[in-house]
Image (cartoon, rainbow, N blue to C red):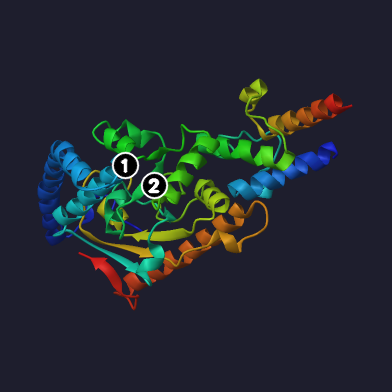
Amino acid sequence: MTWPQSIFTIRPLDFLLILLMNLTALPLMLIWTAVGIFLFPVLFLILKVATRWNAEQITRRLIWVYGRGWLATMLPFIRSELIARKQHKIKPPCIYVANHLSFFDIYCLAVLPSFNVSIAIRNWPFKMYWYAPFMHMAGYLNIEKMSWKKFSQSAAQILSKGGALLFFPEGHRSRDGQLQRFYSGAFRLAAETGFKIVPLCIQGTDEVLPPGRWWLKPAKVTIKAIDPVYPKSYTAPHDHRLIRKNVKQMMIRSLSEMDLNKRMGNANEPRSVWGS
Amino acid sequence: MTDQQIIDLINTSLEEEFELEAEDMQPEALLFEDLELDSLDIVDLVVVLERAFQFKIREEDSIQDIRTLGDIHRFVINKKRSLTSDKT
């Protein structure tokens, strides 16, 4: 995968589109974020009274709505779609593992069919003070600051209540578009709890905003959910390593197919379950 | 378990856990700089060693001094010896 490193390498028409995107989409995103922050307490209270959801579920629902709203504001510039063979198979409770290409990966994951998703992340995203309170309220897990015992207990609780846990097993964004080394957390958790893993292959967000670039570029974003991996079919000790290896191989294969389909000008892919 | 068996078990466990190459598993290899492990891996490292050798190490003060693969070898060998002498 490649992306233009300089804005000066782009054709004039594309340059105008990029300019339009950066002049409109970024301010819209800021406005949408500000609106979300101010409306959150009101909507939280309404949902608290009107539903039986707990604070974490309400916050996750509102974050999901925020993500979908973000996708809507980007609609003229980012076409996003989720590809899944059988939608019911990728619904929580489950452990989502996704490749990581861009800061916007997390926003694009609003295409997932469920709102009840907590995220296992490193320490630095909690330093974004405008998002941090919502991340805490939604029960996002700081994998860098928790002991494994505490982390796995909290994660198991989320999964047993019917939620999902999302990991980026590479730990940080890929600089060359290729999958990097996988950390073990998601796979050890699957081996310990028995909950299925749903691998998610993200393509195109590195065209929108790769690491090291500060301007946005229109692109098509595709998220392909591979059929789940069930840890119960692995029986030997330390099977999390085998699960990790198999999931990574599946993702490498799937990302190569997606890349090939894209270069061939598109796809005999399975049906899209949600698209914009 | 001989010292060499302990070293081999540590090396194979870390190779599998962290997708490392066998030729990189040199005693002088620095964990962060040479093997490119990071703070997240240290959590996994502790779990891997505890499971491989069936003892608790997270409360040990000397774990703070570990910098190289050789430090891990020495730490585990010494820990095994102290546990064996405690039993006898």
Q: Is residue B20 visible?
A: no
- Which SS class for mark 1? helix
Q: State if disc 2 and disc 1 touch (CB < 8 Å).
A: no
Query: Which label belongs to residue A275?
Result: none
Q: Is A27 or A21 nearer to us in this picture?
A: A27
The x and y percentages for residue A251 are 46, 62
Q: Is A215 or A148 nearer to us in this picture?
A: A148
- Which SS class for mark 2? loop
Which chain does the numbered disc 2 sit on?
A: A
> Does residue B54 appear to the left or right of B38 in the view shown?
right
Q: Residues within 10 Å of mark 2 (few under 14, many from 20)?
A: many
Q: Which residue is painted at 51% across and 50% down in the image?
A: A182
Q: Is B8 or A110 nearer to us in this picture?
A: A110
The earlier-in-sequence mark between 1 and 2 is 1
Count of residue discs = 2
Q: Residue furthest bottom?
A: A268
Which chain does the numbered disc 1 sit on?
A: A
Q: Is residue A3 above or below residue A256?
A: above
**Three-letter amino acid code of the residue under disc 2:** Arg
Q: Residues within 10 Å of mark 1 (few under 14, many from 20)?
A: many
Q: Which residue is painted at 85% across and 28% down in the image?
A: B87
Q: Is B68 or A6 nearer to us in this picture?
A: B68
Q: Is residue A270 above or below residue A217?
A: below
Query: Which label belongs to residue A173?
Result: 2
**Residue tagged by mark 1?**
A56
The x and y percentages for residue A155 are 46, 44
Which quarter shows the N terminus of chain B?
top right
Q: Is residue B52 visible?
A: yes
**Three-letter amino acid code of the residue under disc 1:** Glu
Q: Residue furthest top?
A: B61
Q: Which residue is painted at 51% across and 35% down in the image?
A: A150
